Image: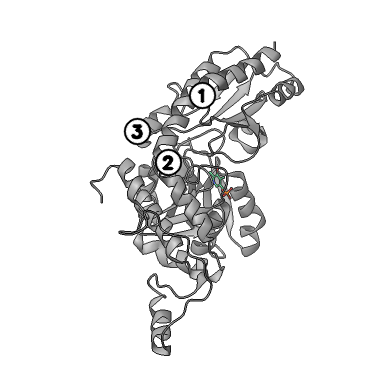
């Protein structure tokens, strides 16, 4: 399959070899065996391979999506989780134990940071952060560091890590390198190819793509799979077949949608950058963005996310009143669906909090599949309301 282009892969992955074009939705908890010997054999084999045995261990629909994600991520095997955050939590618990330290890039998804502070600390697992742009990131490694966890491009400001370089250092020291690949959504960025051991996706975002399903996945290299399988079984993590079906359906149009999100976002990012009320635009596909060189080297495309800083002289209350009047951009969490969204960002959750000058009002935009001309008109009205 490796010679097949990725666009063609999306039309083939996770499908039956004959019969129905799509893998059917299988519902079930109990799986029946013909005799005790068969039942016993399945229980032995399932320690090390995928065997139908009980609903909590997945079924044909779930396996089809696991296989599709494994092929896209270029790994050995994948496990699915009910949310992206559950996939992150399982990754920490699979590979870390009391006394260990995990080093995270500071652009990591905010709830993942909270998970470290609230839960991992109670289990005696220490964590700290490094600036993804810090060339001297090694100084944050400790003798007990067992995992480096990166989100590249990171949440909110899209800072990127030099994964091949980090991978060489981590392998030399026996440290596991894990990446949250939600931004790249498998097609645009390939952490495993760039040297990571584990790649995580919030399939809730672009893989699902229609704002109607929650899902997470973890894909690993062969030598790291068993701890992931064990934590998934021990924590009783499984996804519904309907949800797996929805994500498989989303995959069919992933490339098309990403291309459209990316071209719309790049156009809007460039245009917003020339507006007087906007001081900064963060979008790695934008020439001039601090992460553009790494993005060009390591990523294959962009997506619909961008973040803007309004002129600090503008009154935040007036900015919010103008945002409330947007017609095409909804106000709500998440991204990766077909629709455009905006969400205010607290500077305290970003590296901007460390800068001397307080930043202006921060807004993250997700550019959806609407006509970019309509989105621009909407944003023009916002800017006009600011005077
Ligand atoms: C949304 C998101 C997650 C979490 O996914 P959920 O399915 O909402 O739990 C994880 N990482 C990143 C980068 C995200 O944007």
Question: How far is the residue under mark 1 from the one under mark 2?
Answer: 18 Å
Residue lying furthest front in this view? 19
Other-residue count near label 1 (Cα within 10 Å), few / some / many at <14 / 14–19 / ≥20: few
Q: CA distance from mark 3 to mark 2?
A: 22 Å
Which residue is outermost to the left? 3
Residue at the spot 56% in from the left edge and 49% down from the top edge:
213
Please provide percent x and percent y for residue 123. Answer: 62, 64
**Nearer the camera: disc 3 or disc 1:** 1
Image quadrant assignment for residue 88: bottom right
Q: Compared to 131, does 268 lie above or below?
A: above
Dot in front, 3 or 2: 2
| Residue at position x 39%, y 85% in the image | 38
The residue nearer to you, when weighing 183 against 296, is 183
Mark sitting earlier along the chain (3/2): 2
Q: In the picture shown, does residue 172 fall above or below 43? A: above
Is mark 3 in CB contact (under 8 Å) with mark 2? no
Q: Earlier in the sequence, mark 1 or mark 2?
A: 2
* Mark seen at residue 254: 2
Q: Is residue 194 visible?
A: no
Determine whether the residue tagged by mark 3 lies in a helix, strand or loop. helix
The image shows residue 43 at horizontal and vertical percentages of 43, 80
> Which residue is at the front of the view, 150 or 41?
41
The secondary structure type at the circle numbered 1 is loop
Provide the residue designation for mark 3: 297
* Residue 324, quarter of picture: top right
Q: Which residue is mark 1?
A: 371
Q: Nearer the viewer, mark 1 or mark 2?
A: 1
Quadrant where the C terminus is found in the figure: top right
Is residue 318 something one can see in this rendering?
yes
């Amino acid at each position: 399959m490796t010679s097949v282009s990725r666009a063609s892969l999306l039309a083939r992955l996770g499908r039956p070899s004959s019969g129905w074009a799509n893998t059917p939705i299988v519902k079930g908890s109990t799986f029946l065996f013909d005799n005790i010997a068969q039942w016993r054999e399945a229980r032995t084999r399932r320690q090390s391979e995928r065997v139908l045995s009980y609903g909590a261990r997945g079924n044909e629909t779930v396996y089809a999506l696991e296989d599709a994600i494994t092929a896209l991520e270029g790994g050995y095997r994948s496990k699915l989780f009910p949310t992206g955050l559950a996939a992150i939590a399982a990754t920490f618990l699979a590979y870390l134990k009391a006394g260990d330290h995990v080093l995270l890039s500071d652009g990591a998804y905010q709830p993942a940071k909270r998970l470290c502070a609230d839960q991992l600390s109670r289990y005696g697992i220490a964590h700290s952060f490094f600036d993804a742009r810090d060339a001297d990131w090694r100084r944050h490694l400790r003798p007990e560091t067992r995992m480096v966890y990166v989100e590249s491009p990171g949440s909110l400001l899209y800072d990127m890590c030099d994964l091949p370089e980090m991978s060489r250092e981590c392998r030399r020291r026996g440290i596991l390198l894990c990446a949250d690949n939600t931004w790249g959504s498998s097609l645009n960025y390939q952490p495993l190819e760039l040297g990571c051991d584990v790649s995580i996706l919030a399939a809730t975002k672009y893989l699902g793509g229609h704002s109607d399903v929650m899902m997470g996945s973890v894909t690993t290299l062969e030598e790291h799979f068993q701890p992931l399988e064990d934590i998934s079984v021990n924590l009783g993590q499984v996804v519904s077949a309907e949800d797996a079906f929805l994500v498989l359906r989303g995959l069919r149009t992933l490339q098309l949608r990403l291309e459209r999100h990316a071209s719309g976002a790049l156009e809007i990012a460039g245009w917003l950058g020339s507006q007087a009320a906007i001081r900064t635009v963060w979008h790695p596909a934008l020439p001039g963005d601090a992460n553009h060189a790494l993005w060009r080297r390591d990523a294959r495309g962009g997506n619909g996310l961008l973040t803007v800083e309004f002129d600090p002289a503008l009154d935040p209350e007036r900015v919010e009143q103008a945002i409330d009047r947007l017609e095409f951009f909804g106000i709500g969490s998440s991204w990766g669906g077909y629709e455009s969204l905006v969400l205010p960002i607290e500077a305290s959750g970003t590296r901007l909090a460390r800068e001397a000058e307080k930043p202006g009002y921060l807004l993250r935009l997700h550019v959806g599949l609407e006509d970019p001309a309509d989105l621009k008109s909407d944003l023009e009205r916002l800017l006009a309301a600011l005077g």
